Image (spheres, coloured by chain):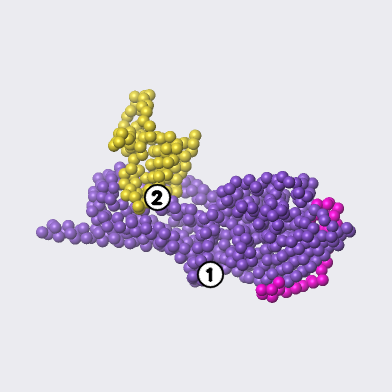
Amino acid sequence: MIKKSLLSLLTLYQKFFTLIGYGSCRYYPTCSEYARWQFEENPLHIAFYKSATRILSCNQLFPGGIDYPQKHRFCEKPVKKAEDLTINKIKFWLVPSKNKKISIIKNFRFKG
Amino acid sequence: MSANQRLILAVVLSFVFFVGYTAIFPPEQVPSEVNATTKTVANTQNSTASSNMPDAQVTHEVAADEQLIATDSSNLVSIEAEHFSMKIDTLGRLSSKVLKDEKYNNNENVHSEMVAQVGTKPLHIRFADKAMNEESLRTPYTTSVRETTITEGASSVVKMQQKLSNQTVTKTLTIYADGHYDVNIALTNDTRYFVYLGQHVMRKGQMMMAVHGAMVYHSDDMTTIVADEDAESRQNFNDVHLTSSFDQYFASIIYGLTPDTTVTIDRDREGDPIVYIAGSQNFTFNGYIGPKEYKVLKAIDPVLTNAIEYGWFTFASAPLFKVLSWLHGIFGNWGWAIIALTLLIRMLLFPLTYKGMLSMQKMKDVAPKVKEVQAKFKGDPQRMNAAVMEIYKKEGANPLGGCLPLLLQIPVFYAIYRVLLNSVELQGADWILWVNDLSRMDPYYILPILMGATMFYQQHITPNNFTDPMQEKIFKYLPVIFTFFFITFPSGLVLYWFVNNIFSILQQFIVNKQFAAMKALKAATNAKEEGK
């Protein structure tokens, strides 16, 4: 419930309010997109904390660049239908990175 | 019209509606506790039931109120001062106060009236005893002085008497040229009665944008505001430092009450708040009625400055006003003070900007790589953005400003908006050329159009890459939307936004210039190398 309303708030922000200062985020994914992935993949409190620190560090004192969200806790969820495993239906790649962390990376070919 | 065009239209309209709605019905219209502290002391009824506490039978009655308004009263005393003329009617109430200064004139260019002709009036006395109250409404006050003039810096005393069958009310008013007054009410027999604060005038036009209603500033720096139409049940307060009935620029204030005095906020038929104060046999207090001008209020009594409120954002807006009036002290003009304030905020953000400019030095190495990547991922903006960011990170150079400075500007803008909206000082404050009143909309629409134009230009020189064509369309129309949105705003606010745009453009211009210079240098060195 909370997650859904937060995500729709984010959509609203991304559609309209981001236009006032469009194209100023120093990161990929942008802060709002980062928050979206966080809220989709991680528990609420983690997502809040991570998104807040991300926005705070999105200024010229920090280098910026590529910064993927990390999966807080990894658990295997079996895919129910085989056709869900086509390249256009996978939303996020969970990629193991340094320090046993798992990065959340959006599939460029995902069609929602 | 194609489906796509209709969709764009719908989105633009809903966006305008959304922004407009929040502007017209700001969330702070609900009664709010300004300070974060909870309303503990405020709403709990005084447990020690003192004889002054109004109970159910003696509260303000709506019907009685209407009767009271209808009561025929004529003028008893006229007071003339350099800046105002005041009238007291035969019921001993302040029935009129007109500000003579032209800068306070209303939209129809008539001198502003401080006392509502419909509604309760300041200093009206209501007795708890019904019979006595009936009689008091029929018995006119008498006085020996019918007309008086106050010279600048002096005061005038008006003594009035009302003789009832078993009660004599003596009301002594000392009215000062600066707009405040001292009151003493003396009764021959001790009885319960209430003194009204009066209601503010419903002003046409700007009433929608600003908070208006009644407020009580009490005990430990707590402010309780009841906005018009939002008054619900009766609320009692003790230890009140001041109570005020206010609109955007003006207020009727009563202060100088003893801590045990009970102040009540009640509601009238429309749900507007009505404030009255429980009196005693020998009751002394102070009052002020007029514009909420910081310097004037501070000179009378520093506690009065608490009557200037900017809604729930007071904590940020009040210091901002102090900075603004300090700048006004330097420049002697509110227009230049606003520009200086914009510059000041920009300067506070300068360390960030400077850091960004430094990173531009490294851009020369990055530029060709970025171009290469942009060509490679043409038509796939998501992937392109990712690749560009990868390069920025690798080279330690990032030309973008970041989300934090941008988000920080939103509360700053809102604080300025509240300050400019509620500062009576801006009334009649001129700037240059055609701008002769920063508190009103620009009559020639020049400032909003300039604002839109600078916004358009700023967008034009700021690089962008949209992933969504519809977003891009809205983005392009944004300056137009903002121009229309800002048309009715106070000129001072439009001026702020306009100057802010100009600074942004200057900043972007310097960055772009540096960028171009780097490129040229790079090209030159390349050519040299090829020539070798």
Label 1 packing within 10 angstroms: few (<14), some (14-19), many (20+): some
Give the chain of mark 2.
Answer: B
Tell me which corner region of the image, top left, top right, bottom left or bottom right, holds residue B350: bottom left
Is B286 in front, or is B523? Answer: B286
Question: Is residue B213 shown to the viewer in this render?
Answer: no
Where is residue B301 shown, x and y percent of the image?
63, 64
Identify the magenta region: B126-155
Query: Please, which residue is most extreme toward the left here?
Result: B532
- Under mark 2, the amino acid is Cys
Tell how many labels: 2
Badge 1 vs badge 2, beta-carbon distance below 8 Å? no
Instruction: Using the image, determine if residue B134 lies above or below residue A36.
Output: below
Give the residue pinned by disc 1.
B430
Where is residue B24 shown, x and y percent of the image?
56, 52
Where is residue B143 shown, x and y percent of the image?
82, 68
Give the residue pinned by disc 2.
B403
Chain B hue?
Answer: purple
Residue under the point 48% across and 58% down: B483
Is B483 in front, or is B220? Answer: B220
